[in-house]
Image: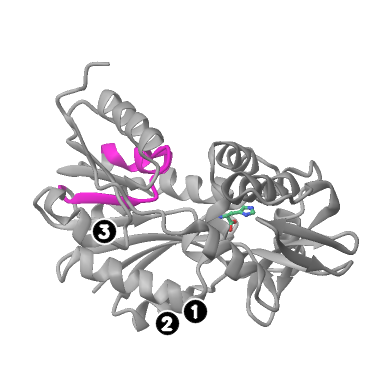
Amino acid sequence: MPQAANVHFFDAHPAFGDCRSEIVAGLQREQKTLDPKWFYDAEGSAIFERITRLPEYYPTRAEVSILTSQREAIAQRCGLGSVFIEPGAGNCAKARLLLDALRPSAFVPLDISADFLFAAARGVGEDFPWLEVTALCADFRDFRSFEDHLPVGRRVLFYPGSTIGNLDPDHAIEFLSEARDLVGADGGALIGVDLHKSTGRLESAYNDAQGVTAEFNLNILRRVNDLVGSDFDPDRFAHRAFYNERLRRIEMHLVSEQTQSVCIDGLPFHFEAGESIHTESSYKYSVEDFSDLAARAGLQRRETWLDHDGLFALHYLEP
Ligand code: AVI
C-alpha cells in the first residue's frame, strides 16, 4: 500500500523478554500473579474495546466527554505547535479528538505492537493531511531505542485512559519520572486518571451484567496457554473483582473453582479451591493524591478537568 508523505515509521524492534520465566515467577509467588500486559493480544484488545462501551464502564465515556468539551482549553494549556507523543497509542482514537485544536508540529504514536500501530498511524495521516505523523514501534521505557527518531520541538506527552492506574504507585512514579525526562524542562504531560469514588460504583464497572469483564479476565489464561504451552482450563476459574478500599485499587482475580494442578512443560502449579491468581490492579486517585504522586516524580499539576459527573480527571502536568 502506498505510504502517505506525512506518515513516517520506525521499528525499534522492542524486546519482549523471556515470557516463560516471567509467567513462572508470577505463578510461584505466594499470591499467584499474572501481569496484565498479557491481556492485550488481538482477542483481548477486542474484548477491551467492548468493555469501553459497557453501560457500567464509565471511564472511557467520561474521559471522551472531557476531551471533546474542553479541547480548546486543553490545547491552550498544552501549548500549540508541540510534538505530541502518545505511548501505548493503540488506535489513536483519543488523540484524534485533540489534534485539530492542538495543531501539533508532529504526532508521535508509540506502541510495542507494530502492525496495529502502523495501521492506526496511517489512518491518522490520511484524516489529518496537514499533520506530520511519526509512528514508533518501541518500548516507551527504552528511550534510547527511539530518541533519534523523535521530531524536533517542545514535547507534550499524552497518556489517557487511566492506564497509569494499572501500575502500582512506585511504578507509576517511575513512569512519570521517565515522562518528565522525555519531555524536558519546557515540556508537559496530559494524563487521564480515574477518580476514587464509592465502592458500589467502582465494583459495578468491573463486574458488568453481560460478563464482558469476566471474559476479558479469563481470556488471559488462553493467552498464557498460547505463550508458554500451559494447560489452564478457563472453565475451572471464575472472575472476581473488588475494590480494596485501603489501597484504593480495584483488584481483578481469577479464582480456582476446585483443587487442581496446572502444568507448564511438566512443571506443576497447585491450586486449592478458592485460591486466586491476581491479574490486575486498577488504582483510583483523588485529585490531591494524584498531585502528590506526580510531585514525587518532579511534575507539578497545573490544571485538571473533570467530566460533568466528577468521575474522571484529566491532569496537565509540568516539570
Ligand atoms: C486499561 N485499563 C485502564 C483498564 C482499567 O480500567 O484498569 C483495564 C480494565 N480492566 C478491566 N476493565 C478494564
Q: Is residue 230 left or right of residue 109?
A: right
Magenta region includes residue 83: yes
Residue flagged by tag 1: what amino acid is it? Asp
Q: Disc 1 and disc 2: Cα gap in Å?
A: 5 Å
Q: Is residue 234 left or right of residue 226?
A: right
Residue shown at the point (42%, 37%) measured from the top left? 91
Vertical placement of 48 versus 284: above or below?
Answer: above
In which image quadrant can residue 249 be found? Answer: bottom right
Residue flagged by tag 2: what amino acid is it? Asp
Residue flagged by tag 3: what amino acid is it? Arg
**Comparing marks 2 and 3, which lies closer to the viewer?**
2
Residue shown at the point (41%, 34%) measured from the top left? 116
Vertical placement of 87 versus 113: above or below?
Answer: below
**Comparing marks 3 and 1, which lies closer to the viewer?**
1
Magenta region includes residue 99: yes
In which image quadrant can residue 61 be found? Answer: top right
- Whole-percent x, y for residue 109 in the image: 30, 44
Residue where numbered disc 2 is placed: 292
CB at disc 2 and ligand 1 closer than 8 Å: no
- Whole-percent x, y for residue 216 in the image: 67, 46
Q: Are marks 1 and 2 in contact (CB under 8 Å)?
A: yes
- Whole-percent x, y for residue 142 in the image: 28, 61
The stretch of residues the image draws in magenta is 81-100
Nearest the eye: 288 or 248: 248
- Assign a secondary structure to mark 1: helix
Q: Are marks 3 and 1 in contact (CB under 8 Å)?
A: no
Residue where numbered disc 1 is placed: 289
Q: Quadrant of the C terminus?
A: bottom left
Q: Quadrant of ligand 1?
A: bottom right
Residue where numbered disc 3 is placed: 77
